[in-house]
Amino acid sequence: MASQPHRVLFPEQQQTDRTPIRVLIGLNTPMDCQLLQTAVKNSRQRFDVAACAVSRHGILDSFSREKIDVALINVDLEDGRLAGLEVLPELRATHHETPVVMLFDTWQDDLILHAFRAGAKGVFCRLEKDLEQLWKCINAVYEGQVWANSGQLQLLLNALRSEAVISPVASPGMRSLAVREAQVANLVAEGLPNRDIAVKLGLSEHTVSNYLFRIYNKLGISNRIELALYVLKEREPRNALPLPPASIRESRTKGKTMGAKA
């Protein structure tokens, strides 16, 4: 995949504190870990290297012993090829609040898709010579954003169209959502963070988070980027009954309230 400017997408929340970000480095050799650790320490960023690991077991052990704010994990580890990808589902199950950035030696479209589906919040190529981009990536995912470039986002959208990443057969679809849930889902697809969604809908951020968990369960998805892509797919003209904008959906529902109760 050609190199393109990176963007941060679908922010979850904004962190305003300046406490150090504790980073786990998971690469395939101790030397690689040491080199990146030195670069992090020399970066003058608010980063602390909490742990270094070269294997799946080492990564899981580090998570059990240390407070990790952001994990940088190489696709391949000392365990073997794709071992880094294989640890993602375990981390999502036990430490879902910690964002993971998957590091690639070279871009591979199928592995990028796999990484995002497995719960990664960002992808980064180790061939990138400008380490400032990596520091921006770490800060972005720590703040609840997804780090990807426009080509990778297009890759995800194309996958939804051609491979049915989220199958309508396996899920009742957007029509299963209550009016307020549909509003939240549409605003997520527009890139609004929870704080802005809460203000727009007159809710608390905690309530918005609760809506998101319910939406994920109903649609059979697991994270914000999947939800945004799901909504964008539903909006495509080729769908028989695309979901209307939240404001129209709400007005229609209000107009039918009396009839529904009758």
Image (cartoon, rainbow, N blue to C red):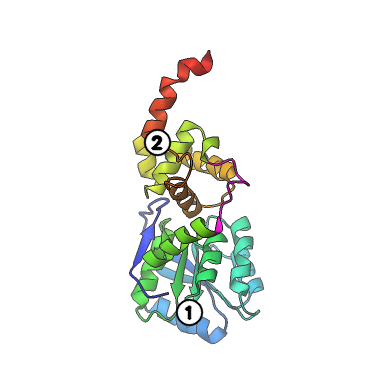
Position of residue 217 measured from the top left corner of the image (x, y, whole percent) = 59, 43
Where is 213 relative to 223, above or below? above
Q: Which stretch did the figure color magenta?
A: 163-173
Q: Is residue 46 visible?
A: no
Local packing at callout 2 (Cα closer than 10 Å; few below 14, some 14-19, many 20+) is some
Position of residue 67 measured from the top left corner of the image (x, y, whole percent) = 54, 62
Q: Quadrant of the N terminus?
A: bottom left
Magenta-colored segment: predominant secondary structure: loop
Q: Earlier in the sequence, mark 1 or mark 2?
A: 1
Tell me which amino acid carries mark 2: Ala
Q: Is residue 168 magenta?
A: yes
The residue at 46%/79% (across/down) is 37
Q: Which disc is residue 106 wearing?
A: 1
Local packing at callout 1 (Cα closer than 10 Å; few below 14, some 14-19, many 20+) is few
- Give the number of marks: 2
Tell me which amino acid carries mark 1: Thr
SS under mark 2: helix
Q: Is residue 29 visible?
A: yes
Where is 216 relative to 207, above or below? below
State the residue in front, 27 or 18. 27
SS under mark 1: loop
Position of residue 240 measured from the top left corner of the image (x, y, whole percent) = 48, 41
Position of residue 167 measured from the top left corner of the image (x, y, whole percent) = 58, 50
Residue lying furthest bottom: 31
Residue 82 picture quarter: bottom right
Q: Is residue 185 magenta?
A: no
Q: What is the spatial separation of the Cα atoms under label 1 and label 2, in whole angstroms?
A: 40 Å
State the residue in front, 151 or 60. 151
Q: Which residue position is annotated with label 2? A: 246
The residue at 59%/58% (across/down) is 92
